[in-house]
Amino acid sequence: MGTPDTQSKPGDLKILVLKVGRLPVALISGSCVFAALAVLSDLSIPTMALHSLPIVLVTMAAFVLNDLYDAPKDRLAGADKPVARGQVSLLATRFFAVGLMAGAVAVAALLRQGYSLYVVVAALIAVWLYSPTSRRIPVAKGLAAAVLCCVPLAYASAVTSVRFPPALYLLLITFMVGRELLLDVLDLPGDLKAGIRTLAAYLGPAPSRFAGWSLMAASLVALAARTDGTARYLFVAALVSLGAAGAICRRDESKGLRWSRLTLLLGVLAIPFSV
């Protein structure tokens, strides 16, 4: 029969895909690749969609591996996460993580163009190391996550042979560092219970919120200022979306940060038009 930790349940796959792998969030990474290929290449739509798939799978694998590694901490903190709450079996979650990683490599190898396969393999190694490294150096957690968010651009660059300006990477990292800082504020009570001191613990909640929102806004302003045409319109739309997310956060911080995913989506869609 198995134990609660290992026995698979009928609803495992749906929970794993949507709540553990966070497919809706992972699709933002995929949309970055798709948009870049649509603007910067002459590939067919099916081929662009296939090229987006490895990045979606890598992003999902990152979420799954992180939830597996953080399960003890999340249980202690009472976090509402399926792995920590036992809503999915550990065995099924591990198999799911392996399947995602294998799928990402297989699709990337099939479509291999330039150094695109190496980007996927390097990204998988990085997401494998992310959780233990973040636990050992929690103040660097936000920066590490922000750098990983550049993988879709690196992959698109490998496929198209178009180099994105370093400033775009830097400003994307700046935006993500700000967003990660806000997420750390949200997770601060649970992290402190587990003895984990992220940057938000050192700065304090109020200064962290100020720094987080300021970094996100400043990066979008800079991106809008250095671009024109479609890219500028999309970055301005992202700024408006960020303002809405901030207003929502005043009533419900968790919901406001979820809204900021739209801001991120608008931003990544704008990047290819800025090259």
Image (cartoon, helix red, strand yellow):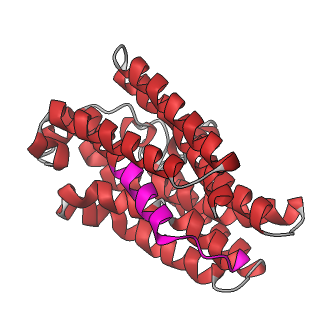
On screen, 25 above or below 36? above
On the picture, is 112 further left or further right than 9? Answer: right
Residue 91 image position (x, y, % from top left): 49, 55
On the picture, is 181 further left or further right than 41? Answer: left
In the image, which residues are magenta? 160-177
Residue 73 image position (x, y, % from top left): 24, 45
The residue depicted at 38 percent of the width and 35 percent of the height is: 85
Occupied quadrant, residue 41: bottom right
The residue depicted at 35 percent of the width and 64 percent of the height is: 130
Occupied quadrant, residue 163: bottom right
The residue depicted at 69 percent of the width and 80 percent of the height is: 161
- Residue 148 within the magenta-colored segment of the rendering: no
Residue 171 image position (x, y, % from top left): 43, 57
The residue depicted at 62 percent of the width and 62 percent of the height is: 55
On the picture, is 14 further left or further right than 244? Answer: right
Residue 273 image position (x, y, % from top left): 68, 56
On screen, 36 above or below 79? below
Q: Main secondary structure of the magenta part?
A: helix
- Residue 166 within the magenta-colored segment of the rendering: yes
Quarter in which the C terminus is drawn: bottom right
